[in-house]
Image (cartoon, rainbow, N blue to C red):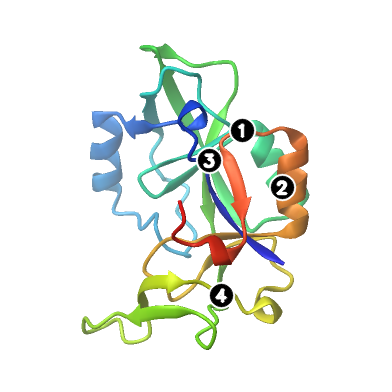
Amino acid sequence: MVKLWRQDARVERYTTAGFSDESMEALDASGENYGGAAPLSDQFPKLTIRIRTRHAPDDYFTVGILFVASEGIKRILEEFNVKAQYFQLDVIYRRKPYLKRRFFFVHLLDYVDCFDFDRSQYAMETKKGWPDRVKTIEMLAIDESKAAGYDLFILDKVRDLVRCASDELAARVENSGMTGVEFVPPSMWGRY
């Protein structure tokens, strides 16, 4: 069964962070499409993120659309041969470099077309150029047969960035004690 990979919403475990001004400028200047399935160049800029929460950063959190993972989660993803690129980040916490753990932007490369149009409730995008893209989702269902063989992927043809994980990967992450991530069935879409 596929589960949704999402940031743990509990206040005490919810890491908020933002880019440094220099990183925003570097991203803008790079011209990289870091929100797509295409591999990023080796020239992807070095990014610095600033942790805004009082607690140290969780093992998983997002900065904008970026999937940020600790070295521990990165090792698990590598064990599962997740198709991704990893770019190390500089992390600032309490105005100092955070050196207890390394963190990475995980650029997922697998986009899987497994949105179940028959069992989901949704609205399609109406803008020109996006004829087959789901704009909003009321109830989400995944075609498990099309998702088979993928341990971590992004749901293709959906406007929202929906990250999905296999049961095996979800269990491995949960059993490892990694923080900041929770896994829920697709039927829980919108209930967070």
Nearest to the eye among marks 1 and 2: give it: 1
Query: Eyeballing the image, is 159 above or below 174?
Result: below
Circle nearer the N terminus (2, 3):
3
Question: Which badge, 3 or 4, comes first in the chain's sequence?
Answer: 3
Alpha carbon distance from label 3 to label 4: 21 Å
Residue pictured at 67% horizontal, 56% vertical: 82
Amino acid residing under circle 3: Asp
The CA span between labels 1 and 2 is 18 Å
**Circle 2 residue:** 78
**What residue is pinned by disc 1?**
179
At a point 45% along the width and 31% down the height, the residue shown is 11
Q: Earlier in the sequence, mark 1 or mark 4?
A: 4
Circle nearer the N terminus (4, 2): 2
Q: Are marks 1 and 2 in contact (CB under 8 Å)?
A: no
Amino acid on which the number 4 mark rests in the picture: Ala
- Alpha carbon separation for disc pair 1 and 4: 26 Å
Assign a secondary structure to mark 1.
loop
Q: Nearer the viewer, mark 1 or mark 4?
A: 4
Check contact, mark 4 vs mark 2: CB within 8 A: no
Mark 4 closeness class: few <14, some 14–19, many ≥20 residues within 10 Å: many
Look at mark 4 in the image and give the residue it sits on: 141
Residue plotted at (69% across, 48% down):
77
Residue 109 seen in this snapshot: no
The residue singled out by tag 3 in the image is: 8
Mark 1 neighbour class, 10 Å CA radius: few under 14, some 14 to 19, many 20 or more? many
Label placed on residue 160: none
In percent of width and height, residue 113 lies at 54, 78
For the residues bearing labels 1 and 4, Cβ distance under 8 angstroms: no
